[in-house]
Image (spheres, rainbow, N blue to C red):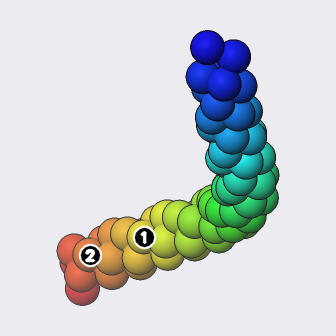
Amino acid sequence: MSEEIHRDLGKHDAQIEALQDQVNRLHKDMYKMMDQLSGIQQTLSEAKGGWRTLLWISGLSATIGGVVVKVAMWFQTIPR
């Protein structure tokens, strides 16, 4: 009976060590993913500023284009 208990305890100790190794690997992987996520977040933050600039420029050019067309149409309607 005592041999079975020692064998079972040894088996459980090995399983516990294997689980601890797996948990440690998961922690390392999680830290790697957090670093990668931080990099992605920084890249998206930088891109957001670029998109805002692009939208401002396109809005400004559309406004200027509209004013130019309006003035051109106004000049065409002036009686000569």
Compared to residue 21, the image places residue 74 above or below, namely below
72, above or below 30, in the image? below
Instruction: Choose between 14 and 2: the one closer to the eye.
Output: 2
Q: Earlier in the sequence, mark 2 or mark 1?
A: 1
Name the side, left or right, on which 76 lies relative to 65: left
Q: Residue furthest bottom?
A: 80
In the image, residue 78 lies at what x, y percent? 27, 76
Residue 3 in sight: yes
Image location (x, y in percent) of residue 28? 77, 54
Report the residue at 69% width, 16% height from top.
2
Q: Is residue 25 above or below residue 58?
A: above
Circle 1 — which element?
helix
Residue at image mark 1: 62
| Residue 13 picture location, percent across and down | 73, 33
Task: Residue 53: tell me if it is visible.
Answer: no
Q: Which class describes the residues within 10 Å of circle 1: few (<14), some (14-19), or many (20+)?
A: few
Q: Which residue is mark 2?
A: 73
Determine the CA span between mark 2 and mark 1: 16 Å
Residue count near mark 2 (Cα–Cα under 10 Å), binned few <14, some 14–19, many ≥20: few
Q: Residue furthest top?
A: 1
The secondary structure type at the circle numbered 2 is helix
Give the residue drawn at x 57%, y 65%. 51
6 left or right of 70 in image: right
- Tell me residue 54's x, y (percent): 56, 71
- The amino acid type, in three-letter code, at marker 2 is Met
Which residue is located at x 70 percent, y 33 percent?
A: 10
- Pick the residue in front: 31 or 36: 31
Residue type at numbered disc 1: Ala
> In the image, is residue 41 above or below residue 9?
below
Q: Judge depth for marks 2 and 1 and give the one in front.
A: 1
